Amino acid sequence: MVLHKKTVSFIALFLLLLVISSNYVLYHSSFGLQSLPADLNGLVVGSILDLSLVAPLLFLAWQRKFSLKHFIVLMATGLIAARFIIPSEYLASFQTVMWLGVGIEGVLILFELSLLFMLVKNVPPILRRIKSSSLPLLFSFSRAVNEKFPNQTFLHILCSEMLMFYYAFGTWKKQPSNEGNTFTLYKRSSFITFQIMIIHAIVIETLGLHWLLHNTSMTLSIVLLILNIYSIVFFIGDIQALRLNPLRVEDARIYVSFGLAKHMEISFKDIEEIIEDTHILEQKIPNTTIEFIARDFETVHPDLLLTLKSPIEATLFMGIKKKYKQVAIRVDDPHAFKKIVKERLEKAQRNELI
């Protein structure tokens, strides 16, 4: 039996969480401490291998993105995590291995700091490029960064985070475009209301967990507090990015985004077919299709499906790039959207024939 890719990812994530949590419980719970054998060296070696080899491999399997560079970074991170998970008295015989992880991380940090310096140096030309562009900010920013740093994953992630903070804190006086060639994606749903509910839930959870944990595990309490604050900032930025970046149809291209999660440029000359058949649209969407659909508690389907002549790259959260063969779109004014898309597609096809 062949397992589905999403099933493999789910299994890998489950095993990853199991490996990390079981090692933590082993050294930080009364049950785990009672189970420790007299000779701990073998057990500690197993934990180090779990965190520096098994956990990185499971993480890469979960992300479905294998590379030697990422594996080395994750391995070093696992060795550093082992210093915090395994009590220091048990690591006395393994200090050399532990310092190896610190050394690798130190080299990587110095390298990333050099990239950060390069980014700061190039901020003025990037901002000038953005201001001179007529494209939506998500697209002009992405283009400017790709032109300056085409293969620097770390800088793409950092720029993605900068964009998140900008939308969360720097856009409250801005108004969304209401031009005739723009279409919102969220007003036919309760998506933003759902996002706000999640923010409220995170705030309540943060207050409760921080109060419960600050006396028992201050470190865990602070880590969860930071993660929850980050989550709140992300959801606020995502809502603002969704509001301020409606889908835009130009003469030659469609610029479509869904908050901070994903955005994509689609040239009309790359569109092979527009599918409006309700029976097809109501079927399960395959992995080769990217969705720009606001989902809430109800089951909804796209208004149309764009089949592309060849896979086109989309930019996902953290600057991750992925290619898709179809694009599923649901807008708040489907009739006007379908009309303008068909007109522009017919025009592009006529130009190709001339």
Image (spheres, helix red, strand yellow):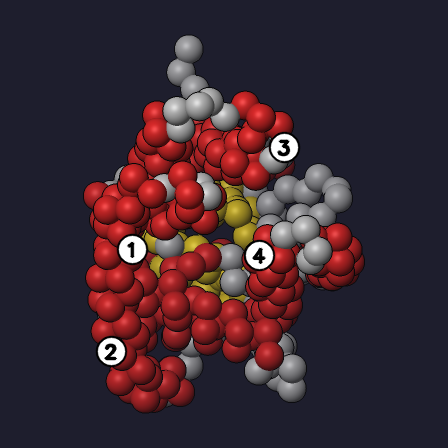
Instruction: List x then y, in percent, for residue 121.
Output: 26, 85
The amino acid marked with disc number 3 is Ser
The amino acid marked with disc number 2 is Met
Task: State yes or no: discs 2 and 1 in contact (Cβ < 8 Å).
Answer: no
For marks 2 and 4, give the one nearer the viewer.
4
Q: Residues within 10 Å of mark 2 (few under 14, many from 20)?
A: some
- Tell me if residue 213 comes above or below residue 48 in the rendering: below
Q: Provide the secondary structure element on which disc 1 rests.
A: helix
Of mark 2 and mark 4, the one earlier in the sequence is 2
**In the picture, residue 177 is in which quadrant?**
bottom right
Q: CA distance from mark 2 to mark 3?
A: 49 Å
Of mark 3 and mark 4, the one earlier in the sequence is 3
Nearer to me, 291 or 354: 291
Nearer to me, 181 or 31: 31
The amino acid marked with disc number 1 is Val
The amino acid marked with disc number 4 is Thr
- Can residue 181 be seen by looking at this rendering? no
Of mark 1 and mark 3, the one earlier in the sequence is 3
Q: CA distance from mark 4 to mark 1?
A: 20 Å
Mark 3 sits on what residue?
Answer: 30
